[in-house]
Amino acid sequence: GNSVTQMEGPVTLSEEAFLTINCTYTATGYPSLFWYVQYPGEGLQLLLKATKADDKGSNKGFEATYRKETTSFHLEKGSVQVSDSAVYFCALRNNAGNMLTFGGGTRLMVKP
Amino acid sequence: EAQVTQNPRYLITVTGKKLTVTCSQNMNHEYMSWYRQDPGLGLRQIYYSMNVEVTDKGDVPEGYKVSRKEKRNFPLILESPSPNQTSLYFCASRTDRGSEAFFGQGTRLTVV
């Protein structure tokens, strides 16, 4: 079956530091890939997505590139802010479109 | 305002006492899903529905039931809750296979 593996947290950074959260996946066919963010006490919100190989998703300074050769979708941001503190989930959706499979989540803490 | 609404937000109940968590969306979405979120496991899909009267099992359906009698509502039913169903539950909806999923704010369930 499909699976998503992302780095365990928490990741603690100082403001303006560079962020990378690794995500790799196992899937058949050509899944779509997503990053979701969950702020404290809230549901998940879509951060960015990519639907085919070599696509780059970007939003709010965050980027991730769909790398089929390495089955990866790493999340990056050049300069994090305190307001970026949240839990980040990598996810894939199967070809049929009926299943979203999530990684375990990575908690990011940004200190001033 | 487009939203997915879950009720209740918090619930503590005893083993074996039937309960229902409601989910309603106002976006006329066809697809609706239920997930549970547990530490280190990310979100796992319990059930999903592709339209009225069409439901199917996700990854962890045991101990749960759902129904989809109307397009906007997708209640999650625990006929005989057990302590291992203590978790944070999220309902989500989307319009078609290629679109973003919108999540509710979550229901924190404790079964004692």
Image (cartoon, helix red, strand yellow):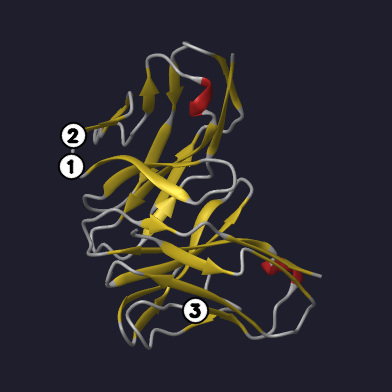
Please tell me which residue is depicted at 47% across the width and 72% down the height of the picture: B23
Distance (Cα) linking label 2 and label 1: 6 Å
Give the chain letter at badge 3: B
In the picture, residue B97 is in which quadrant? bottom left
Please tell me whether mark 1 sits on a helix, a strand or a loop: loop
- The foreground one among A95 and A62 is A62
Q: Are marks 2 and 1 in contact (CB under 8 Å)?
A: yes
Mark carried by residue A55: 2
What amino acid is found at the position of numbered circle 2 in the picture? Asp
Q: Residues within 10 Å of mark 3 (few under 14, many from 20)?
A: many
Residue B75 numbered tag: 3
Q: Along the line of sight, which residue is nearer the eye, B86 or B10?
A: B10
**Residue B42 seen from this side:** yes
Residue lying at 74% horizontally and 84% vertically, measured from the top left:
B17
Marks 2 and 3, how far apart at CA: 36 Å
Q: Position of residue A89 (x, y in %)?
A: 46, 42
Q: Amino acid at mark 3?
A: Pro
